[in-house]
Image (tube, grey):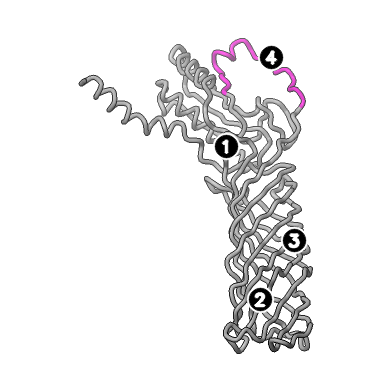
Amino acid sequence: MQLRSVLLGTLLLSAPTVAMAQLPELAPPPPLSGLYIGAGAGANWLQPEHLINPATGNAANGNLVAQTGFVALGSVGYALPNGLRFEIEGDYRSNKWNHASGLGFPGGAGGYEVKYAAMFNALYDFSALIPVPWFAPYAGVGVGYGWARQSSTRFYNNVTGIPRFALGGTEGAIAYQAIVGGAFNIPYVRGLAFTAEYRFFGMGSRSYDTLISTSPTTAFGAKVKLGNDFNHAILLGLRYNFAPPAPPPPPAPAPVPAQAPARSYLVFFDWDKATLTDRARQIIREAAENSTRVQYTRIEVNGYTDTSGTPQYNKGLSIRRARAVQAELIANGVPQNAITIQGFGDTHLLVPTGPGVREPQNRRVEIIIR
């Protein structure tokens, strides 16, 4: 019974350590490259819409006030290596009318305003300029065309029911928006990221056919113009960056001098990772054991990346890889003061490639025993 209690206590104490070891690396998603798709949904708040005097074109005192509504969108885009990207987007917004104000009588309202829009957006990813440890910020603007449909829209005297205005139809206008957001890494699924955004969306004024009832038996048709159509929205979504075409098979590595294996060791990494694989740990253990059999003055640990990210991002990733190897060497008995680390980013490629190529042999750390 006592042995069982000791084993249970040991398991409970070690569980947090094991769980932390299994947590994914906290890092922003890699820079976008080429084609990507995205989708999002959330809540939108419609500012009160002015009723515009058709004779003067000026905003009247009256407003239609809406409840919090729903927004959803989907996009297809293409990212350039410099952080600039462009996308085509389709979106949907819906708000239920809650009441009317500023009409000179207690204003009731009902029905919905449903909007559809096709937008062209230009955005910029700030990852290279603003290094943040856990997300990649971005901002952009968009312009396009939107359609607003009045579905059973009406406003009226909330006490007597008269006068009563009933609007209907779908009208279009120029649409525009501003976007601020961030992307968060989703581990284990390459190219997939979680997004959170704020969007400001606006549309030009529109005129709708309206039936105006001035008494229970008297009604006539007219035009009512709505303006000041401004939406604020918070959205959560997903984004997937398609992998670029696979590079051609790498050329055979150059012959290594006979004495090099005893002094130099290569540790390879998965794409956009600084975590050690089992094979990497085995190589580091061999280097640590061999360092005890030779006379050395120092041990150099140099980190490198492929060319798929920006130079600034790759520099930081190569340093994280070098630090991971340094920590494993120390765990295997190598004195910390004997080790020097450097990160060279996407320079000194083992296999020469162009920009934006995910070459496995370039994602490495070299251990040199001198």
Q: SS of the residue at dot 3? A: strand
**Label 4 vs label 3, nearer the camera:** 3
CA separation in Å, label 4 and label 3:
60 Å
CA separation in Å, label 1 and label 3:
40 Å
Magenta-drawn segment? 248-267
CA separation in Å, label 4 and label 1:
28 Å
**Residue 130, horizontal then vertical, whole percent:** 58, 51
CA separation in Å, label 1 and label 2:
50 Å
Q: Which of marks 4 and 1 is nearer the N terminus?
A: 4
Q: Which part of the image, by quadrant, shows the N terminus?
A: top left
**Residue 243's disc number:** none
Q: Which of marks 4 and 2 is nearer the N terminus?
A: 2
Say whether marks 1 and 3 touch (CB < 8 Å): no
Q: In this view, does 55 lie above or below 207?
A: below
- Whether the magenta-drawn stretch holds residue 348 is answered as no
Three-letter code, disc 3: Ala
The local crowd at label 4, few if under 14, some if 14 to 19, many if 20 or more residues have their Cα within 10 Å, is few
Q: SS of the residue at dot 4? A: loop
Q: Identify the residue under disc 2.
A: 49
Which image quadrant is residue 332 in?
top left
Q: In this image, 349 relative to 106: left or right? A: right
- Give whichever of 144, 279 is nearer the camera: 144
Number of on-image labels: 4
Which image quadrant is residue 164 in?
bottom right
Q: Identify the residue under disc 4.
A: 255
Q: Identify the residue under disc 3.
A: 117
Q: Identify the residue under disc 1.
A: 317
Three-letter code, disc 4: Pro
Q: SS of the residue at dot 1? A: helix
